[in-house]
Image (cartoon, rainbow, N blue to C red):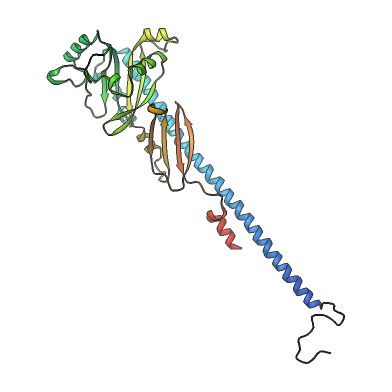
């Protein structure tokens, strides 16, 4: 017998646990196990959601990068086509004037079709022996701005075995450059670079300082025959000059990321002193860089935000976790 008021014994007289107590303990253990399982499933599910979101975000960023690259590739191809066409025009019209080149350029779309182009010029090689005759011709029919008293004096002054002058040009501003500027002495291109381009038949890309602006200079060899001769000797024999084009690639970059306010791009070519790098947009905090190779030796880097695959860094996965 139990004493009145005393708690009931959890066991029978032989020490066996009462059935009610056993059932309660079993349900408690089952409930705890159920909670552990649910939390585990929630954690696994949240991790899967975070991983899937990160993968989808990475695919989206890669697709955006490919679209930007395709846009820039097309723009570069169109400009290369323009440069080739200009070369043909100059080869067919060796005595073309600034006005004639300007009319031809306007006829193919000009500065409207090529918003990145600042100007283009036909650059010729003049030897020291040829300089007096070339100077007299320029003073009689100037293709650019002359010095004091209408004199053609090389810039910078001095005697050199070779000079590189602009014979004909067209500029976005509508103004002319100094006719006597020796590009082999004043630009990042030296004479050996120009001669290498002549022999190779391949265009060269170089950064060009234009006031406070960093432009891209493209120098393309011109030959009087097409296609370009296959040997160095034949190329030297057919060579007539170089077509120089200055442009602002940042203009193309700005156009390529229109509608992408959280995307930044970097466009680079070459290395060392010859490296040309241009940027557009503002890289978001935590942005990931996606690097792509673009036709013509260019490297394009797109900076975009990619979702993290961490559970607590992903809003969807955190929300799922909190539901449990």
Where residue 285 sits in the image (x, y, percent)?
44, 48
Left or right relative to 268: residue 20: right
In the image, residue 44 sits, relative to residue 190, either above or below, namely below
Residue found farthest to the right: 14
Q: Quadrant of the N terminus?
A: bottom right
Q: Residue 224 location, x and y as percent?
A: 35, 10
Q: Which of the 4 image quadrants contains residue 243?
A: top left
Rendered view: 36 above or below 95: below
Hey, which residue is sitting farthest left in the picture? Answer: 149
Q: Is residue 184 left or right of residue 146?
A: right
**Which quadrant would residue 88 be assigned to in this image?**
top left
Q: Nearer the viewer, residue 150 or 271?
A: 271
Give residue 73's position: percent from left, percent from top: 44, 30
Which of the 4 image quarters holds residue 77? top left
Q: Is residue 237 left or right of residue 14?
A: left
Residue 118 in picture, x, y percent from top left: 30, 29
Residue beneath the point at 79% across and 91% down: 3
Is residue 192 shown above or below 303? Answer: above
Q: Residue at coordinates 51% horizontally, 40% vertically from top-left?
A: 62
Q: Residue at x 78, y 77 (%)?
A: 21
């Amino acid at each position: 017998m139990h004493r009145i008021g005393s708690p009931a014994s959890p066991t029978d007289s032989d020490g066996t646990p009462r059935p009610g107590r056993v059932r309660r303990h079993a349900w408690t253990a089952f409930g705890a196990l159920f909670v552990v399982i649910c939390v585990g499933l929630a954690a696994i599910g949240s991790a899967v959601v975070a991983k899937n979101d990160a993968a989808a975000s990475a695919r989206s960023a890669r697709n955006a990068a490919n679209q930007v690259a395709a846009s820039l590739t097309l723009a570069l191809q169109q400009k290369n086509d323009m440069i080739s066409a200009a070369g043909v025009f100059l080869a067919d019209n060796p005595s073309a004037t600034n006005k004639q080149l300007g009319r031809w350029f306007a006829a193919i779309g000009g500065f409207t079709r090529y918003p990145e182009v600042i100007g283009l010029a036909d650059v010729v090689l003049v030897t020291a022996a040829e300089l007096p005759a070339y100077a007299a011709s320029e003073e009689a029919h100037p293709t650019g701005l002359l010095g004091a008293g209408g004199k053609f004096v090389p810039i910078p002054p001095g005697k050199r075995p070779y000079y590189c002058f602009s014979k004909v040009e067209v500029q976005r501003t509508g103004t002319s450059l100094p006719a006597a500027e020796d590009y082999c002495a004043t630009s990042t291109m030296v004479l050996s670079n120009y001669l290498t381009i002549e022999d190779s038949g391949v265009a060269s890309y170089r950064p060009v300082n234009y006031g406070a602006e960093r432009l891209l200079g493209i120098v393309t060899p011109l030959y009087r025959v097409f296609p370009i001769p296959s040997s160095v000797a034949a190329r030297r024999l057919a060579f007539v000059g170089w077509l120089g084009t200055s442009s602002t690639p940042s203009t193309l970059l700005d156009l390529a990321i229109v509608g992408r306010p959280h995307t930044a791009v970097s466009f680079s070519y070459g290395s060392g002193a010859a490296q040309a790098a241009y940027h557009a947009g503002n890289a978001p905090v935590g942005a990931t860089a996606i690097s792509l190779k673009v036709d013509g030796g260019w490297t394009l880097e797109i900076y975009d935000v990619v979702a993290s695959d961490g559970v607590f860094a992903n809003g969807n996965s955190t929300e799922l976790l909190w539901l449990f």
